Image (cartoon, helix red, strand yellow):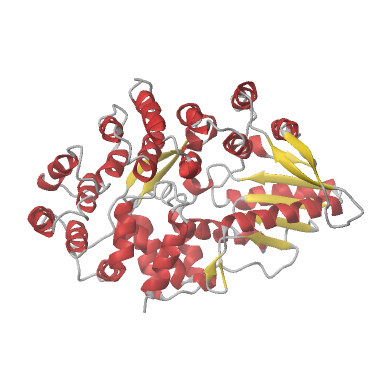
Amino acid sequence: MTNHTKVKEFYLWDYNGTLFPMDTCKCLVENNSSSLSVYISKIANPKETDYSFLSQETVYASKAGHHLRRTMKLDPVAEYYLYQMAYKNRRIFRKSSNPSRENFGYRFFEGLPVAIHESYKEFSSKAEDLKSKYKYFIKFDISAFFNSIYHHDLTNWFSSQKPTQADINLFGQYMREINTGFSIDFLPHGLYPSKMLGSHFLSFMDHSELIRCEHMIRFMDDYMLFSNSKDVLIKDFQTIQKGLGQKSLNLNTDKTVLFSDVEKSIEQEVDDIKSQILEKIYVGSGSGMDYEEYEEAVRNLTDLEVEYLINMLSEDEATDHEASLILDCIHEHSDTFYEYIPDFIYRFPHLSKKIYHKCEDILEIPELTERLIELVDSGRYMNEYQLFWIAKISEKHLMSAKSVGTLLAKLYEHRDATNISKAKILEIPESGFGMPDWREVHLKNGSSGWLAWASAVGMRSDAKQRKNYLLGYFSKVSPMNKLIGDSIIAL
């Protein structure tokens, strides 16, 4: 029996950290998770021939250096299934029992998912401890890991964990149908259940008796081997490559570190600037203490310092961590952070989601809206990830601005807009700016896809009579439309 409350809590806990969080999925999970589960049970029933997992929409999230992460945006049923599967089978995602072969994160502990940042902090701390303990280490990761996993390998791993036969069959059907039968590039990125699968799929190397180094740690596909012997490390390094090669997985040669760390010059420069803006201020003890007490006061960055930090991001060696560090520094130490947001989004698309989360304390809402309109209307190329997250910023932070309707219209009609970036606009429950007419087009054209689904969810605050009229026809098109239509009418 599915515990809908626990699955829903798991889903909502992860929601804001995903690559393309859509209210279309969230609304159904929050308000009608039991119907999603019933729909999935019909997919599992061979007699229910009208039900199956749908082929999913391909999307592209930004990575550093204008690289793209190809993945898929799951519909509400497919997305809910992953969380339901992972929660139901959470006991198969275990921490390593071997203290010298450790894997970190992507599991449940005491009934709750382990936070990724806490796991990575634990992994990093362990790495530093082991560096001081052993003379040498090798660090490496797998190239395009999620896109390279072979469907049958993951399905075979899942079945080896001994879930029920029904769960094995449905798991294989899911992985096959969401990618139209294509055997690789099927595992969605950015979702905690997917990361659980990816991380624990690699446990076959953790348990290998052929690995001889004194200590090995792993965070997802990031490996670190430690030993006092270079010879042992080299042999293990090549043994792991051969083992991964049996699964058609290859290492990222550009990120491999042999025996010692690479200098983190950019991070050091950021630290230098941060140290320059800290001023020591004497605070009188006032209570008879015989020592002086100090506290740090922080001044704002100058325009030159901000420009210097931004220019550092253009250097080829800047990592995601360093770029985020620079963004954090400007956000924390500048009164005009909003002025830099459009430039950051345009120049560094991979930071778009992080910028969305940094907009919580911005007060210059009209000014930021106008600056984003200038960016969107500039005629410059913008990718799906940028347009999506500008729409998210608009929905959460800018709806009180007079010109936000102009911004939403320009995002919707942008020459580089995609089904998902448009769907993000359509699902906003706004009755002004002519948006009901935008939605009505997709609700009446007999379609079943993201534009129609998002349009239906965008009506969730409309009058019941209007919802009954438009969603009645919409719901007749497909089982998915009916599931969404019934859920919205019931609100």
Q: Quick check: 421 left or right of 335? A: left
Question: Is 68 positioned to the left or the right of 450 in the image?
Answer: right
244 shown above or below 263 = below
Residue 267 quadrant:
top right
Q: Residue at x 15, y 47 (%)?
A: 447
Residue 257 or residue 292, whichever sits in front:
292
Q: Position of residue 367 (x, y in %)?
A: 40, 30
Quadrant the C terminus occupies? bottom left
In the displayed structure image, the side of residue 283 where residue 402 appears, left or right: left
Nearest the eye: 369 or 229 = 369
Which picture quadrant has residue 252? top right
Residue at 51% x, 56% y: name it. Answer: 195
Residue 402 position, x and y percent, is: 29, 34
Q: Quadrant of the N terminus?
A: bottom left
User: Looking at the picture, how far across and down is residue 434, in whole percent?
Assistant: 17, 38
- Relative vertical location of residue 62 with respect to residue 193 in this rendering, above or below: above
Residue 153 visible at all? no
Position above or below: 161 against 202: below
Residue that extends furthest to the bottom in the rendered view of this protein? 1
Name the residue: 34% across, 57% down: 26
The residue depicted at 45 percent of the width and 65 percent of the height is 10
Q: Total number of numbered labels?
A: 0
In the depicted structure, whether residue 448 falls above or below residue 158: above
